[in-house]
Amino acid sequence: MKNIIFVLLLVSSPLFAVNEFYSLTRSIRSLGMGGAFFGMSDDEYALFSNPAGLSHRQDNTELKVRLNGQVSNSAISGFKDFTNLGNKNLDTAINTLNEHQGKPMYGQVGLLPSFLRKNLAVGLLVADTKLGFNITKGISTDPAQIALMDPNAEIADLTAISDSGIVLGYGQSIIHPNLHLGLNLKGLFRAGGRKAFTAAEYIAKQKINIDPKEIGGSGMGVDLDLGATYEMPYLPFGVLSRASVVFSNLLATDFSSSRQGGVPPRMVRTANLGWYTAFEGVGFVDNFHLLADISDIPLGGESNPNLGARNTGSFLKKVHLGVEMPIGRLSLRTGVNQGYLTAGVGLNLSFIKLDFATYGEETGGSTNQQSRRYALTIALGWGGGPAEPVTRQEEKVVNPVKTEPVKAVAPEKTEPKPESTNPVTPKN
């Protein structure tokens, strides 16, 4: 009975929309650097950012399986509180939901086996699943507000998107040694969508179904990314600088092949700009990597901001700044993502990689609705290890092969043959 009374006390307060920038998968190394990566893009996540970066990679081979996980700081307590409201008294339940209103609860998990070498990468994305739960309504005990209660009012929403598929990336210098082009070809399966939960559904004690196929729809599609990077010579700062431009999801696939159920969210076609500069290290720091991206500039595709569209929000949501400081096998990272500070650390061994990051994600139309998140990735496999420190690349000059001059040989002097002294006897 208390559950029913509690739900009837829900009132229509301003709706808190979650405008998340959902992606296929995200590099946790990059998240520690403010989400910037298009200018560097030198590991397996070139498959999801800038494939031209594969052309810059050192000539070593990696074969690894990477497990990624993320969670927002409100996710664990939020899910638990919402599902256990029936065990609490009315006042406690009201206070609990009021505390969580406008604090999106986010979780992500995914698997990425990959093969990586210079110029070429192949990745198998396995059930990279993103879940976002949000309480949208406030609570009141005012009788006047109770009388205005709509049983169909939305009290919460759940967005679930799961991506799987195979991605092939190739990058190569072309025309000029400083110009590098790359292409990612993606065959994808996507399931998911968004579901709103109403007061009437909660009264009926309907369970929250987090199966992406049931929440939205599912289907298959093909898409591709095109990236270009130019190495900037003769700049007065740094030892290496690159400027990049990437067009992601050029086909903006709508997953129309083998579609079942509803319509899953489309891919978003975007333009992305990246800059990367490496500076010489100081002391025990090998290098200072500085990155700056302006990304997620919308060019079509998904138009619903609740399902990942990039056509809403302030310009600051598209700005990413980052720093990475490799120290042998250890890397320290920091940056600014969508206006919020980030931090990260990485450990790069021959058979295991660990990356941790904490970052702020903007979930509203402007930069004032931060969701603080924590991310961890573990990669196991063969190959890799720390990269060599970046040094200035001097222009190569081909010197001609030195050869000793050929000395002219004077012709040998030959003495003329003496004339014969024997008299010639004429024949009769």
Image: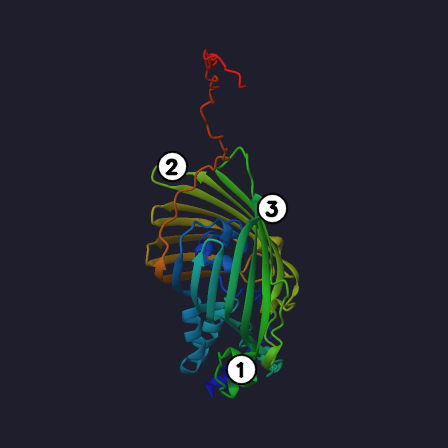
**Front position in the image: 76 or 267:** 267
Question: Residue drawn 48% across and 35% down?
Answer: 394
**Colour scheme used in the picture?**
rainbow
Nearer-the-camera pick, 42 or 11: 42
User: Which comes before the other along the chain, label 1 or label 2?
Assistant: 1
State the image coordinates of residue 321 (x, y, percent, origin top left).
51, 48
Residue 150 numbered tag = none
Q: Count residues near mark 2 (Cα–Cα under 10 Å), then give few for <14, some for 14-19, many for 20+.
A: few
Front in this rendered view, residue 231 or 88: 231
Amino acid at pointer 1:
Glu
Say which element carries label 2: loop
Amino acid type, mark 2: Val
Q: Residue at x 41, y 75 (%)?
A: 80
What is the distance, in whole Å, between disc 3 and disc 2 at their CAs?
36 Å
Mark 3, residue position: 175
Q: Is residue 376 above or below residue 139?
A: above
Residue extending farthest front: 428
The answer to whether residue 139 shows anywhere in this view is no
* Quarter placement of the C terminus: top right
Q: Is residue 331 left or right of residue 187?
A: left
The residue under label 1 is 214
x, y percentage for residue 315? Answer: 62, 53
- Residue 386 visible in the snapshot: yes
- Say whether residue 176 is left or right of residue 240: right
* Residue located beneath label 2 in the image: 282
Q: Residues within 10 Å of mark 1 (few under 14, many from 20)?
A: some
Q: Nearer the viewer, mark 1 or mark 2?
A: 2
In primary-sequence order, the first of circles 1 and 3 is 3
